Amino acid sequence: MSDNDNDAVEVVEDADESPAEAADDSEEAPAEADEVAEAETTGTADAATDEGTAETDEEAEADAGPTFDEDVMPDDEADLLIPVEDYLAAGVHIGTQQKTQDMERFIHRVRDDGLYVLDVSRTDQRIRTAADFLANYAPEQILVTSSRQYGQFPAKKFADAVGARARTGRFIPGTLTNPEYAGYIEPDVVVVTDPIGDAQAVKEAITVGIPVIAMCDSNNQTSNVDLVVPTNNKGRRALSVVYWLLANETLDRRGSDTVYALEDFEAEI
């Protein structure tokens, strides 16, 4: 089953001085020099820190604060699983500054800052569709993966909630394809947090012929994805909301009375 066809960062003022002013300036100079030195030291440390946290910065940007005046879907009266304001508060709609042809149909518009805005009504619809699909599988035959830091906690929580298996962090090659590997498993369906970060899991799923459900941002290719759930897949809150909704909807289709709260899917910072 393929989802390509179905709806998958910011003077020194020269002036004549009186002797008193000059004396004052002379007293202030050491303090100013100290401030400059401190600023330079801090700037160097900050630069080093920035170089080592590129991916975290990308995710933090995607996890920006809520904006409630966004135009995020063509039909303002669409029936959603949660109020549109909740999707906005979580930043589910915030895409990247790149888009692929595969994801174009899930993009509602582009903002003035160049970020693409995902259609949250399509996100909502696809969460329902993914839940319908997953409900047909034995819980233990569902595998959820996340190499992205912000996706790991909600992915694990999703697995716990629906009885699935989780592989977070680095996906060990051979997990799905090498029976000699101690961690070898044979799931019937794989849910990935990002087709880019979870490329190894997607590759192995294709090799063994099992379907892939993927959380896809505006910059993702979906040629190897069977069911796209369009969402910001870099933001902590966005991923918490999507996995929370997917878990509750899957449980509902199984006839379970268990309902989880969003707080259950939000990791402490």
Image: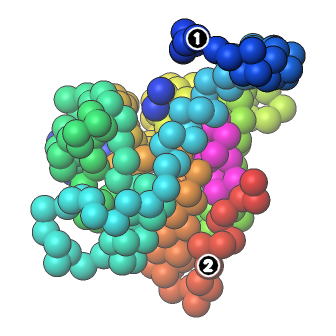
Left or right of residue 140, residue 188 in this image: left
Looking at this view, is 233 or 209 the one in front?
233
Residue 183 shown left or right of residue 238 in the figure: right
- In the rendered view, tell whether residue 266 sits above or below residue 176: below
Between 248 and 59, the residue placed more toward the observer is: 59
Tell me the number on the disc at residue 31.
Answer: none
Quarter holding residue 125: bottom left
Coordinates of residue 207 in the picture (x, y in percent): 49, 26
Decide if residue 150 is in sight here: yes
Spatial CA span between label 1 and label 2? 68 Å
Q: Considering only vertical position in the picture, is 244 above or below 96?
A: below
**Residue at left offset 58%, top offset 90%:** 257
Region in magenta: 143-156
Q: Nearer the viewer, residue 58 or 186?
A: 58
The picture places residue 269, in percent across and down from the top left corner, at 75, 54
User: Which label sits on residue 16?
Assistant: 1
**Residue at image x 47%, y 27%?**
10
Q: Is residue 26 left or right of residue 21?
A: right
Q: Is residue 153 magenta?
A: yes
Circle nearer the N terminus (1, 2): 1
Query: Amino acid type of disc 2?
Result: Ala
* Residue 39 can be seen in this image: no
Identified by mark 1, the residue type is: Asp
Quarter of the picture containing the N terminus is top left
In the rendered image, residue 227 lying in the magenta stretch gets the answer no
Q: Which mark is residue 261?
A: 2
Give the farthest residue toward the left.
74
